[in-house]
């Protein structure tokens, strides 16, 4: 039996771009044999929180709230697609989530964050982890973060065919763990990366990186860069010691020269 996965998205903005990531997840989960369903907070249209679902008597809750509660109870897992507003959570998605409590209990939940810049909504992802855990969900530690959402995914939620070499390299270099079994190890001893479409809710890991630093670099190249940085750090820390030793030697030499000029030869302190 296929897993029924609810994918929640909460932006109310007119020119929202995070819907691309939500559509991407819906399509990718369906390709893997699951039964995903997009829950768009803007389309559901719950009011600002006044009474939680559990505070209504049976049959008295608004129709949209009653329908959504039934879907949440029947779901096998959840994915929360979130942007970042001033280091915080999207109010639309938070408002929808707060209408329910017991309906969330003991189901796995994953967080997929995005932003127009390179931080990829990381602050919001951290904030959501604690919130979802407090509401009784089992939040997987792996997260999906997408930076540069407008360039990474097109309006249909697909990777642009002409996104450029950096974008394609970022997808290839994503450090993912595929459910397809162990992978061979590269020259550096690390697991060689392989593209998977999205994270598994049973602990698999995916991260779509838009950073130019890691895009296109093989593990052995990253190891070489790390060694170079370590050598530079060592040289930088050792430089003050060398300067101090040179200063002490020059000072001792000046003292000896001064004593000779006064006609009083001193003993070399290193000869004793």
Image (tube, grey):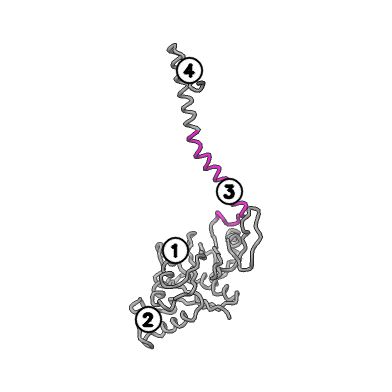
In the picture, which quadrant includes the N terminus? bottom right
Q: Check disc 4: other Cα within 10 Å, few if <14, some if 14-19, many if 20+.
A: few
At label 3, counting other C-alpha atoms closer than 10 Å, the crowd grade (few under 14, some 14-19, many 20 or more) is: few
**Residue 267: mark:** 4
The residue stretch that appears in magenta: 212-241
Q: Secondary structure at mark 4?
A: loop
Helix or strand or loop: what does disc 1 sit on? helix
Q: Which x, y percent locates residue 242?
A: 50, 33
Label 4 – label 2 distance at C-alpha: 92 Å
Q: Pick whichever of labels 1 and 2 is earlier in the sequence.
A: 2
Q: CA distance from mark 1 to mark 2?
A: 27 Å
Q: Position of residue 77 (x, y in %)?
A: 50, 75
- Please name the residue shown 34% across and 79% down the image: 51
Closer mark to the observer between disc 3 and disc 4: 4
N-terminal-most mark, 1 or 3: 1
Rendered view: 228 above or below 48: above
Q: Marks 3 and 2: in contact by CB < 8 Å?
A: no
Crowd around label 2: few <14 · some 14–19 · many ≥20 (10 Å): some
In front: label 4 or label 2: 4
Per the picture, the main secondary structure of the magenta-coloured stretch is helix
Residue under pointer 2:
54
Image depth: mark 4 or mark 1 in front: 4
Q: Which residue is mark 3?
A: 225
Mark 1 and mark 2 residues within 8 Å of each other at the beta carbon: no
SS class of the residue under badge 2? Answer: helix
Magenta stretch holds residue 43: no
Residue 171, located in which quarter of the rendered image? Answer: bottom right
Q: Are marks 3 and 4 in contact (CB under 8 Å)?
A: no
The furthest residue to the left:
50
Residue 126: numbered disc? 1
* Cα–Cα gap, marks 1 and 3: 29 Å
Disc 1 vs disc 2: which is toward the camera? 2
């Amino acid at each position: 039996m296929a897993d029924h996965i609810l994918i929640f998205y909460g932006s109310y903005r007119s020119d929202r771009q995070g819907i691309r990531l939500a559509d991407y997840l819906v399509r990718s989960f369906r390709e893997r044999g699951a039964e995903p369903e997009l829950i768009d907070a803007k389309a559901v249209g719950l009011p600002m929180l006044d009474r939680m679902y559990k505070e209504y008597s049976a049959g008295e809750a608004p129709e949209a709230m009653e329908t959504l509660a039934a879907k949440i109870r029947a779901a096998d897992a959840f994915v929360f697609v979130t942007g970042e507003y001033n280091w915080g959570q999207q109010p639309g998605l938070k408002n929808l989530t707060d209408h329910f409590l017991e309906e969330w209990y003991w189901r796995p939940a994953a967080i997929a964050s995005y932003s127009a810049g390179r931080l990829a909504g990381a602050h919001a992802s951290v904030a959501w982890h604690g919130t979802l855990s407090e509401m009784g969900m089992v939040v997987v530690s792996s997260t999906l973060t997408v930076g540069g959402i407008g360039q990474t995914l097109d309006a249909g939620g697909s990777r642009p065919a002409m996104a450029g070499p950096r974008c394609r390299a970022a997808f290839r270099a994503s450090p993912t763990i595929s459910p397809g079994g162990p992978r061979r190890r590269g020259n550096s001893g690390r697991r060689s990366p392989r593209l998977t479409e999205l994270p598994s809710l049973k602990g698999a890991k995916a991260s779509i990186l838009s950073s130019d630093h890691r895009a296109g670099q093989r593990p052995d190249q990253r190891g070489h860069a790390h060694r170079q940085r370590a050598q530079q750090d060592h040289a930088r820390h050792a430089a003050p010691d060398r300067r101090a030793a040179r200063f002490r030697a020059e000072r001792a030499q000046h003292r000896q020269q001064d004593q000779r000029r006064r006609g009083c030869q001193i003993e070399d302190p290193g000869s004793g």
